[in-house]
Image: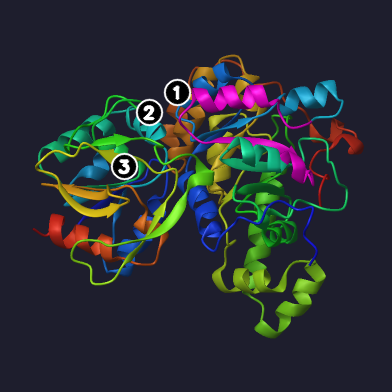
Amino acid sequence: MHIGVLAVQGSFSLHVSMFKSIGVEPVMVRRSTDLKRLDGIVIPGGESTAFQIIMNCDDLGANLLNAIRAGMPAWGTCAGAIILGKGLGNPQPRWELIDVEVVRNAYGRQVDSFVTSLNINGFDKDFDGVFIRAPLFQNAGKDVKILSLYNNTPVMVKQDNILLTSFHPELTSDFRVHKLFLDELVSK
Amino acid sequence: MKNTSLPKPEAGKDSFLLKVGLAEMLKGGVIMDVTNAEQAKIAEDAGGVAVMALERVPADIRKEGGVARMASIRVIEEIMKTVSIPVMAKVRIGHFLEAQVLQELGVDYIDESEVLTPADEANHVYKHDFRVPFVCGCTCLDEALRRIGEGAAMMRTKGEAGTGNVVEAVRHMRRVHSEIRNLTLMRKDELMAEAKRMGAPFEIVVKVAETGKLPVPNFAAGGIATPADAALMMSLGAESVFVGSGIFKSEDPERRAHAIVRATTHYEDASEVLNASRELGEAMPGLEISQIPDEQLLQTRGW
């Protein structure tokens, strides 16, 4: 299985370690040539404006967007969710690959960052959700499956080949969301 | 321990995870010094991952002298309103009141920085008591471990700020890494003596010896002026770079900022660093370290 982790900036090395711990050796994606033969891609946490500007230095952004549009499974954590979702505000344009609005920094600044126990669909035990300057998911369309809620607001959503989490599983040592991405989106 | 004059202890059990977590999000990126909202916008549009708000860039502090303090609240607020990336700001070493003020204001990271005039020659801020994370400078491993012991969630080299000369940042980064390597070679029963010699907290010394790395992200700062400087620091083990005077003291800040961002992402690919280095205009003027009188060196502030 060939999994890519977008590595232009952000928490990519933590995602790489998580995948290694479940026996998958991921590719760090910095150029279009790194996209060849990928079965899925993770867009990590980081700064979504920086991701977009760096990806648009060359054709990486356009090629990655086309690959996901053509069906490549993609999981965005925090900044990655901002890139993949819909919505106004920096950065623009959003890729709109899933029918949910993602509002950047909507939970506040760093002093408002928090950790909370999340109940995730299909997990028998709670998951530690680490929210850092997290984006808010709102106005999810009818085809969007909500996998977890915090304060009645979706924090983990899925539609077709796209998975979004507004929290950071890569900051924990709990690899269940990484496994869910592989089992339910990539191997499907 | 008497604690009445220290900040409100609001930091919970997950506090350190959240503090280091934000540093993790900034990895592989460029944090840029800015003195107003207009510069902050340029930094964000160039792909910077955060901005550092300060009153004067280090090159001007060096030139003009006087006491350098925390930036004005009005300027920091304008910058926070203007950009969507995290906003950091500097406080004087040991000035925990400036730090409390910045926490109230809601800045995302505080740099307890030797670039400003120290407020306390003996003590640094006790950073565990804050909800807002801190970054501190270091010249060597024992200094880094003391700051981490006080609660710093990110380290950076001190380098020699405001010189456009990367030599000190290189020295500090190499020194930290070589001292970490030496620790990993020691027997367990030698670590207490080593902690005593270093003047560093034993538990953190043991952790570094076991893992072979700092328990917090380690970034580069001080004298970085070109895309190749940034790529050099990343190749020496920096996880991100701070660029101070190097951008807004150069001829074409927009292009240089963008080029340094690109070179930081692609530091392992010389052809990309070459592309980033083309047609940049003049870099900031550089200063030879040996020409700076000892009492004007910034890296010797703090301990």
Instruction: State which region is magenta.
Output: B69-98
Marks 3 and 2, how far apart in space?
A: 14 Å
Determine contact: label 3, label 2, CB under 8 Å.
no
Secondary element under disc 1, as helix, strand or loop, is: helix
* N-term mark: 3 or 2: 2
Residue B167: give x, y in percent of width and height: 71, 40
Residue A80 bears which disc, if any? 3
In this picture, residue A165 sits left or right of residue A8: left
Q: In the displayed structure, would residue A111 be above or below residue A182?
A: above
In this picture, residue B216 sits left or right of residue B182: left
Residue A53 bears which disc, if any? 2
Tell me the quarter of the image containing the N terminus of chain B: bottom right
Does the magenta portion include B86?
Answer: yes
Chain identity of mark 3:
A
Q: Which residue is mark 1?
A: B45
The answer to whether residue B9 shows anywhere in this view is yes
Crowd around label 2: few <14 · some 14–19 · many ≥20 (10 Å): many
